[in-house]
Image: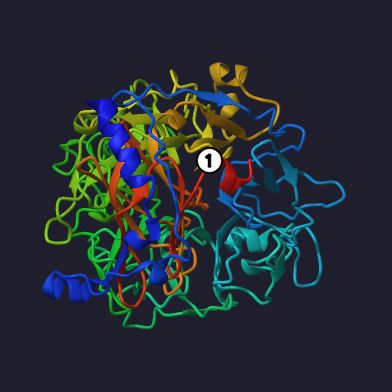
Amino acid sequence: MKKIYFLLFLLVFSIAACGSGSKTENDEDAANDGNTVNDGDQSDSQPDEEVVEPICLTPKVGPYALKFTDISEEMGVQKLNALGTQITVADIDGDKWPDIYTSLASKNREDQNEPQNIYKLLKNVKGKNFEDITFSSGLFTGKDGTNGIASTYVIFADMNNDGFQDAFNVVYVDSDTLSSDSFQEDYSRIYLNNGDGTFKNIGGNFVYDDMFEAIAGAAFLDYDHDGVIDLFIGRQYNSYGNLTSCEPDTLMKGLGNGNFTDVVDGTSGLETEKFNAENALTGKFNKPTWGVSACDVDGDGFADILTSSYGRSYNALYRNKGNGSFEDLSISSGFAHDDNENYGDDQFFACYCEDEAYKGSDYCSISTGAVISCDGIGTGGWDPGFSDQPYRLGGNSAGTLCGDFDGDGDTDLFQIELAHWHIGQASDKSQLIINDGFAEKPLRRLSEEESGITRKRSGSWNDGDLGGFAADFDNDGRLDIYILSSDYPGTKSMLFQQQADGKFSNTAKEAEAQVARAHGGAFVDIDRDGDYDLIVGTSFMRWASSDTDAKSKPEKQWIKVLRNDTGQDANKVIIDISGSTANRDAIGAKIIVKAGGKQFVREVQGAYGLNGFQNDHLQIIGLGDICEVEEIEIRWPDKENSVTKYDKVFANYVLEINQETGLRHHKIEEYFGK
């Protein structure tokens, strides 16, 4: 029967004109009458008819055993001295192959003649190797013509809708930076792509002359659906550890030419003030923002903004109201922090309570006692009325991952947290947060036992989680989570693969994807074979503090390129998407693939997290053992909230989807010129 069915399938669909199967509609009209506004015909959405033969792979039901191969040497990583704690990915020259930027997150300038390799821009030569184009790119040329200006991290987006990736070169500038003798007045700036993979500085400081630019995180989005990319930037401390030194985060509206204007004007709903006793409990104060994400949490089509705070301060969730303004739902949503506020085992609190003046007091009755030496700490590490308040009992939050982790069609979250044993149970740990109908219902946090996202902790443990990404690495249709953990003895990356029951299991070691002191990284189909590979950056911070770690310390902070040898064997939909009335990158577009009676939902995102995480723009959506696609729906972030549907679609091709011209199928090898 299976063979007969496949022959019938081949007969029917091999003559299909795929463009004629597209439909477009307006969300508002569709909601009114349930009908399609414009059925769309081949002339509306497709220039030519296609004859497409089905390609069906026959794996068993997933998940599948993941296996990665280290190809760093053949990609020329050591030869090029490609070092980095942070990685971002973008196709900067428009050849459909993902290029990479690596950075040691420095604030210093580079020397073109004697480079210290503190950052690199590497062209991907068709998955075979990298070519160093750092200084020829123009991306690191200052307004005075100096080549090699500072670059803490870079994120990319098409800011002028010309089809090429522009760049935001971020230089982290705080009060310590300004007082340093090595600071040479390099500031964060926008660089426009010339259309050939080279860049030009459009001049001037990007943000403000009168404000520090301690920009720890930034995210591109189109918050008002005008078809132009906007930018939200998050600022950390200006003076490290001093909460009152924090300055406000800023939403910058894109003008379409690489310039931006501040729209936090008193009516945006994003306004915050310098920390004080009055705004402390409401959360309306400037926070030490570490990471920034933008994704549609409430499902209305508009990107909401999420910020992650260091210093155990509140995280922020700003719901986009769709009218150019936002609503602060940080606390009511449950996103600000978890509900464990028990600081009884905090060792700073314990040392405070060891003092004779407070020992035995009612205030100290919940202390479990000090297990560290309080010499030199005393009462100085704990401030009653401040340290014991909710706005100080959250986490050291590094970033938020957005994705439909439970497969019910809405956007869930994974919060990434740095945590230490001596701070105790009140300090948030990395955690899966489920959407059960936000904003009508608050977000629901899963315990480690419920999600399976856990680890063994003993002794003087530290969770050094600084970043990560959500992707379906085995293409079984379920999102997996890769966590980058660093800066403390024994920390290493973890690959939590989602199992058939929805729980996760750490398979990093078996998959050979476990990297010591993994600090930053990206998922990217580096060889364009239809699955996501890994690029991982490492940190040397505190590495020598452990003999076990020291034995495995590499000579330099070379990046690692790990090729995925599993995902290409499962069925998948590969989408190269671009907007027309929506922004050219289609950031904020929601993709819904209907196949085998299931829905697979992805949202196109730009940069996010701490110090610029940015992954492959190519959307690879795993289908596992399912081959027949019933429909693909695209919800576009434009003024009309347009919806396009395609009902004659085939898996295992590259689907080039342009909002204006429609969908075309391409064989993988031909599309990428392999």
Q: Is residue 14 visible to the viewer in this orientation of the structure?
A: yes
Residue 453 left/right relative to 82? left
Crowd rating for badge 1 (residues with CA inside 10 Å; few <14, some 14–19, many 20+): many
Which residue is located at x 69 percent, y 47 percent? 123
Q: Quadrant of residue 182?
A: bottom right
Query: Which quadrant is the N terminus positioned in?
Result: top left
Q: Residue 185 versus residue 21: which sits nearer the camera?
A: 21
Q: Quadrant of residue 30?
A: bottom left
- The residue beneath circle 1 is 525
What colour scheme does the image use?
A: rainbow
Which residue is located at x 58 percent, y 45 percent? 670
Residue 70 left/right relative to 659? right
Residue 488 left/right relative to 223? right
Residue 162 left/right relative to 391? right
Query: Which quadrant is the C terminus positioned in?
Result: top right
Q: Residue 512 location in percent, x, y?
A: 49, 21
Q: Residue 315 location in percent, x, y?
A: 32, 56
Q: Residue 146 versus residue 158: which sits nearer the camera?
A: 158
Helix, strand or loop status at disc 1: loop
Q: Residue 39 versus residue 364: which sits nearer the camera?
A: 39
Q: Is residue 347 visible to the viewer in this orientation of the structure?
A: no
For residue 85, above or below residue 32: above
Amino acid under label 1?
Answer: Asp
For residue 534, above or below residue 317: above
Q: Residue 669 location in percent, x, y?
A: 57, 41
Q: Residue 494 location in percent, x, y?
A: 42, 29
Number of on-image labels: 1
